[in-house]
Image: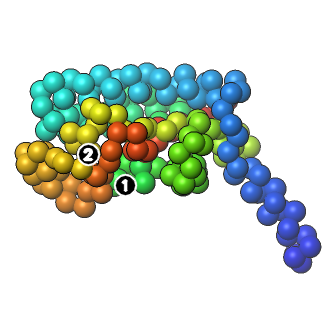
Amino acid sequence: MNSRNTWPLLAAASLLAAPVLAGSDIAAKGAELLLPFKQDMKAALVDGLAAGPAAAIDACRVEAPEIAGKYSTDGVKIGRTSHRLRNPANAGPDWVTPTLERWLADADAREPVVVELDGERVGYVEPIVTQPMCLACHGEALSPAVADTIERLYPEDRATGFAAGDLRGVFWVEFTP
């Protein structure tokens, strides 16, 4: 195939991978699929924090994968990821990366997006913005007990040093509309 024939194919492929701003019925379905996951995650973190930040680390380490598994059924995949991972098992699918990078570069562009994946499936991504409650485990100044727990469980941790309002990562869902 010569370069004249290749260019249209590359242009079409780049359009398929480009995000579509949320606001459609597909985006509403993505948000709906993510909502119970986000609610259960927040409840687990609040419960963990009530028992102390080390318990919140366990909520993320133990409960979060169980919660994601609970809602990843019937062709739906749900997860969370970040540009600075604590747990390498939380690495997201490749299609999430361009949106995460765009949001890191432009804080004003952090609207949920729909990404066309393959003709049948789509992805939906929402930002996770660092909240004050997150700083006990993800902030700049960690208690010695939290720092020790993170070092023991995640020796290659990159998920500290955040401030309230920073992009902490993303929630994502992959589904067939």
10 Å neighbourhood of mark 2: few (<14), some, or many (≥20)? some
Q: Residue at x 69, y 51 (%)?
A: 17
Query: Image check: 68 left or right of 111?
Result: left
Res. 163 visible in picture: yes
Q: Residue furthest right?
A: 4
Q: Residue at x 87, y 76 (%)?
A: 3
User: Residue 139: which numbered mark, if any?
Assistant: 2
Q: Residue furthest left?
A: 145
Looking at this view, is 23 or 124 the one in front?
23
Tell me the SS state at disc 2.
loop
Tell me the SS state at disc 1.
loop
Q: CA distance from mark 1 to mark 2?
A: 13 Å
Query: Which quadrant holds the C terminus?
Result: top right
Q: Quadrant of residue 94?
A: bottom right
Residue 126 in the image: above or below residue 103: above
Indicate the position of residue 21 as horizontal and vertical percent values.
68, 37
Indicate the position of residue 4 as horizontal and vertical percent values.
92, 73
Residue 33 in the image: above or below residue 112: above
Under mark 1, the amino acid is Arg
User: Residue 84: which numbered mark, if any?
Assistant: 1
Indicate the position of residue 110 as horizontal and vertical percent values.
56, 40
Looking at this view, is 16 or 56 the one in front?
56
Indicate the position of residue 40 as horizontal and vertical percent values.
35, 23
Under mark 2, the amino acid is Gly
Q: Name which of mark 1 and mark 2 comes first in the sequence.
A: 1
User: Residue 49: which numbered mark, if any?
Assistant: none
